[in-house]
Image: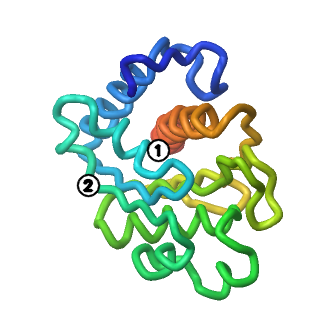
Amino acid sequence: MTDEVALGAVPSHTPEYPTLSELVADVHEMLRAAQETVAVAESLTGGLVSAALTEVAGSSTVFRGGVVAYATDLKLSLVGVDAELLATRGAVDPAVAEGLANGVRQRLGSDWGIGITGVAGPEPQDGKPVGTVFIAISGPGYELAPETVAQLELIGDRNRIRTQAVIETVGLLREAILRRDSERG
């Protein structure tokens, strides 16, 4: 997947990278340099973020694992997202993305956690329109707050929305690492 994905007009988080492979390679280098790892809890993308992060040679040094919690009940049982939150707000919510990021980070023992949920279509879900995506990044020295969860409104068919979400997710991880590093000084 990553070798063929040209970033071009897609996300704002990755302007200097012509391909997803190059973006992933840079994120890997940043994680290796810091001796840190990442884990992913995915819903909307169904494992595509994990696949992108493991396409680069040597990914086992930085990638702990991924959980595809596509069904709402699995967000609770596999990752530990709050049951009341899921019952009251549904699976497509910024707090759910936050719960996915924090839960996968804790359960898989990684330094960084990524949580992604959204609606790829063709129908709306939980009152959210197609293209709504929430991405949360949790990491060391990078405090996650609800207002730091990225909300995207992507346009396109199901495949395009999911592909854009993968690119945005990796770009947001890169930004979080850079922000954390700049705050450490």
Q: x and y percent of residue 22 in the render? A: 38, 19
Which residue occupies 51% across, 15% down?
6
The amino acid on which the numbered mark 2 sits, given as a three-letter code, is Arg
Structural distance between the alpha carbons of marks 2 and 1? 24 Å
Disc 2 element: strand
Q: How many marks?
A: 2
The residue that mark 1 highlights is 184
Choose between 3 and 125: the one closer to the eye: 125
| The residue positioned farthest toward the front in the image shown | 122
- From this view, report whether residue 120 is shown above or below residue 100: above
The amino acid on which the numbered mark 1 sits, given as a three-letter code, is Arg
The residue that mark 2 highlights is 64
Image check: 45 left or right of 111?
A: right
Q: x and y percent of residue 45 in the render? A: 51, 48
* Residue 185 appears in view: no
Which quarter of the figure is the N terminus placed in? top left
The image quadrant that residue 32 belongs to is: top left
Q: Which mark is residue 143?
A: none
- From this view, report whether residue 65 is shown above or below residue 98: above
Q: Tell me the crowding category of disc 2: few under 14, some 14 to 19, or many 20 or more residues within 10 angstroms, Cα based.
A: many
Q: Tell me the crowding category of disc 1: few under 14, some 14 to 19, or many 20 or more residues within 10 angstroms, Cα based.
A: few
Which residue occupies 45% across, 71% down?
103
Image check: 91 left or right of 153?
A: left
Which residue occupies 43% across, 43% down?
49
Disc 1 element: helix
